[in-house]
Image: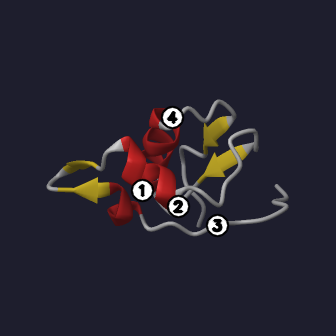
Amino acid sequence: MQFDSAVNIDWENNIENDMFKDIEKLSKIYSKIPKEANVVTYCQGGYRAANAFVALKMLGYEKVKIINEGIV
């Protein structure tokens, strides 16, 4: 699999008081990723990738995929 670019966003940045941050805060975190971009979320086990996937979907990103088994 080839990636044209990558952005590293720690999943913990999405969370505040054990819940996802509000849309305004999440928008600032993900502002470097164009809404029309094809996005793939991944991590070693898939759990953190799932967190990013949900955050992106909450923000209205439509072209988001997750690598379920993670990358080792």
Q: Quadrant of the C terminus?
A: bottom right
Numbered disc in front, either 3 or 1: 3
Quarter of the view holding residue 65: top right
Q: Check contact, mark 4 vs mark 2: CB within 8 A.
A: no
Q: Earlier in the sequence, mark 4 or mark 2?
A: 2
Q: Which residue is mark 4?
A: 57
Q: CA gap, disc 2 to disc 3?
A: 12 Å
- Against 40, residue 6 (above or below) is below
- What secondary structure is marked by label 2? loop
Numbered disc in front, either 4 or 1: 4
Q: Earlier in the sequence, mark 4 or mark 3?
A: 3
- Against 42, residue 13 (above or below) is below
Residue drawn at (36%, 64%), measured in percent from left and top?
Answer: 13
Residue drawn at (55%, 32%), measured in percent from left and top?
Answer: 60
User: Label 3 is placed on what type of residue?
Assistant: Val
Q: Which residue is mark 2?
A: 43
Q: Which residue is mark 1?
A: 48
Q: Which mark is residue 22?
A: none
User: Label 1 is placed on what type of residue?
Assistant: Arg
Residue drawn at (46%, 57%), measured in percent from left and top?
Answer: 45
Q: Residues within 10 Å of mark 2 (few under 14, many from 20)?
A: some
Q: Which residue is mark 3?
A: 7
Q: Earlier in the sequence, mark 3 or mark 1?
A: 3
